[in-house]
Image (spheres, grey):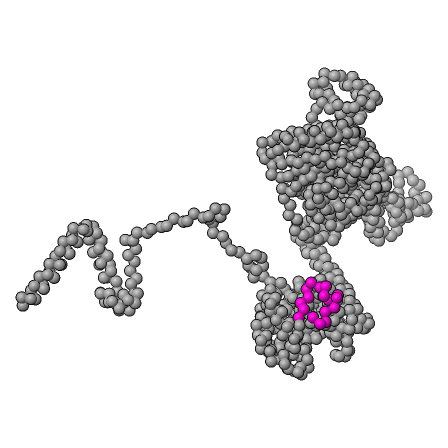
Amino acid sequence: MVGGGRTGVHLLLGFVIGAAFYLILYSSQSEENFKNSLAAFTSCRSPESEGVDVLEPSALEKGRIYKDVSEHWIVHQDSMPTPPANQDATPKVTRTRFAATELGTRERIMAAVMAESALALSINATLGRHIPRVQLFADSSRIDNDLGQLTNLSPYKLNGQKTHSMVLGLLFNMSTHDNYDWLLLAKDSTYFNPFVLLRMIDTMNWNEPVIMGEPAEDGSGRCRLDSGVIFSQPAIALLLINRGACSSLSTATDDDQLAFEKCIQIATNLTCKPLHQGVRYEVWRGERADSPAAHDSIEDWKHSAAFRRALVVPRLLSDADASALHDYFVRVEMARADREIVKMEADLSRLAEEEARETGEAISWPPALPPFAKPPNRYQVPTWEYFTMTEIFRSEPNQNVRRLEGKDFDDVAEVVVAARNEVESEEPELEFVQLRNGYRVFDPRRGMDYMIDLTYRKTVNEMLDPENRFEGDNEAGHEEGLKEIVVERRVHVSRMIASTQLMNQAPYVKEDTDVTVVIPVASEKDVLPARKLLARQARLCLSPTEETRKTRMVVAVFPLVDTRSVTAISNDMEELKRRCKRSLLETDVLPVRPAVSTEGKGTAAAAALDDAVDRYGANNIYLLLSPHADVQKEFFDRARINTIKHYQVFFPVPFVEYHPTISGMEMTEKEEKDTPTEQAREAALSRLRDGVEPKRKRALIVQKEHGRFDSQDFTCFAVYGVDYVTARTKLGVNERRNDLIAAFLGQDGIHILRAVEPTLRIRYHKRSCDMESVDTEDIARCVDSKKENVAAKDQLAKLLFHEK
């Protein structure tokens, strides 16, 4: 009893000491929080034992505590680690490479052709133009030189196996079941009508497992491989995934075609269907089922409606059979398209008439196009060109009438013939006299519209037509005779825009391409203008912004230039390079080897570009500038953007200065106001008669009094070196031309961009045309440009005639 008391005393003493420490260390608030937490903890109930007040340990071990006590927790948030240098902290989104993959879109059909002979080349040519993809599969032992050059050929080696093992394995590696809605499997001796095939797959749904073809004669449900087989997308997946079930057929004694047919049936477990969703798999075999298809039989077969709608023509003998069949079915498709167009036009006309009756407006022609010659508002009224059979009146600032010749004459003559045919088909009694008036205007939505006024002569009997009698005529005489009268007819003709096509994606261009500026100095008279051009270029480099694009200024000096002038140009180039350090400008003086005449400007430009491309490479943009040019800084950016490699050359339309003496730029504005008109006129005529070199006292500004945009000036242009080398072969080495535009005309791959360029100005100079040029049009263009760039018509009139 005493021992138990001693033990209890020690235990009681431990509890007392622990309680004392607790009261000392913890505050009353902590005690209150602990009580609340304990009450909440003990109030939780088991979800499986309703009405139990105390949470059992077994329930705690099973994780059945659902009471939220998070309001007493403290959240510690770690800061985001600093990303390494040159890395973005924004998380990257991983996207698929192609939109088609992300959206799950597929191509419509793929053709898998087993190539066994030269017929595969013809099938590849006929089908490849119409369906997205044609893939050829051939045994490597059968591939010849012509077949081996195809890029869509997949060779294989049998190694004692059947053909279906290799072909299906290659198709599985291509992921055909993921990329195409339909699969066409055929032999190269079978012709497929691509137009019927495309209409067929556009009519049916691909999401149902089905194989279509010509069933075998034994009733086994197989599809004949020599007639081709079409698989839907689910059937493709079944065929390729279950191709291992055909391994037992690789050692069978069946031939390759029969083994392939059995493999298709075993792997897909589908029966061949000649009819699906109302679409029939049409096979044409001629009079006999086993007779081969020959191109000589087409004349006999074309009278059959079943042959015209056939999808498959098997058992071809040669590539001539495939070509003849394809040509025939192309003609059938064109006739079908013509019938659909006629039907569509009739439907449009009917709908237009119904709409006209409802709205009360006139019927527009051609159908579905805006009305004829109806401007959208008063600010966009079109400008009509008036023409006769000899002249045409254009809307030009300096020349309003020109002779009707060339393509304009052919255009007008064809339109007049069409208008005459329309009038004379309705009134054959009329006798054509002449074209009275003609007008034409271009509408980008309708095409070229014409109004043709035709004059006809008509013989009438005045007794039967008393309205045509004239006052004062003898009535009795008119009753007995015939009278010729003049009849006017107006015809509206429209030449619609034809052969429209969607352009490919525009090539990518950027403004940081290197530019090499070439300035040819062919004679001594070009030295001073070239030095002035370099001085103006030096002033452009004074801008505070740094240039990161590389520009190279090259002065091409010809042997006819004096040595002292070459030294002066070299000094100017060194000074230009020193001032343009921030612009990364390079300068160079390029001596040109051949000695050319100073009259052949086109020849001088060609020689300068030839040596420049040889020296600096063909991958740069070469900007040829006339020594008399005056350019702004923005012009170089436009040259970079508008010059596209293997696609486009840039021929800007410059602003050409008039003669300073005639245009009045020799005098300042104060001198012009103080000098009488007659005195200024006589002084200007005196300087012109004496041949005094004009001096400019005003800045050259783009105004109609100072000059004009000359569309016949081709002295400045930008081109890639590789494109220039390709076009240069069109011109002879010593061929004399006034400009180089002829080298880029008539090319399919290179476009010529012409645009008005206010930042490119040509100072006035005595322009000489090479009259020994090989092209008469080149001479005429140069002479016309030279005459029109002297002055405006009103300025010439003020100079030659006294003002009243």
Residue 652, percent across and down?
72, 38
Residue at 72% x, 71% y is: 142
Q: Position of residue 610 (x, y in %)?
A: 76, 41
| 238 relative to 736, above or below | below
Q: Quadrant of residue 209?
A: bottom right
Q: Is residue 485 visible?
A: yes
Quadrant for the C terminus, please: top right
Number of numbered markers: 0
Of residue 727 and residue 468, the one placed in the foreground of this image is: 727
Q: What residue is shown at x 73% (from left), y 50% (from top)?
A: 749
Q: Is residue 783 visible?
A: no
Residue 781 is situated, as x and y percent measured from the top left of the image, at: 81, 37
Q: Which residues are magenta?
A: 140-156
Where residue 554 sits: x, y (%)?
71, 36
Res 253 quadrant in image: bottom right
Residue 216 lies in what quarter of the image? bottom right
Residue drawn at (65%, 42%) of the image: 513
408 sits to left or right of 106: right
- 355 to 660, vertically: above or below: below
Q: Quadrant of the N terminus?
A: bottom left
Check if residue 745 falls in the magenta segment. Answer: no
Who's the residue at 57% across and 57% down the image?
97
Nearer the observer, 267 or 343? 267
Residue 146 magenta-drawn? yes
Front-most of residues 763 and 393: 763
Q: Is residue 242 left or right of residue 747?
A: left
Tell which residue pokes out farthest to the left in this image: 2
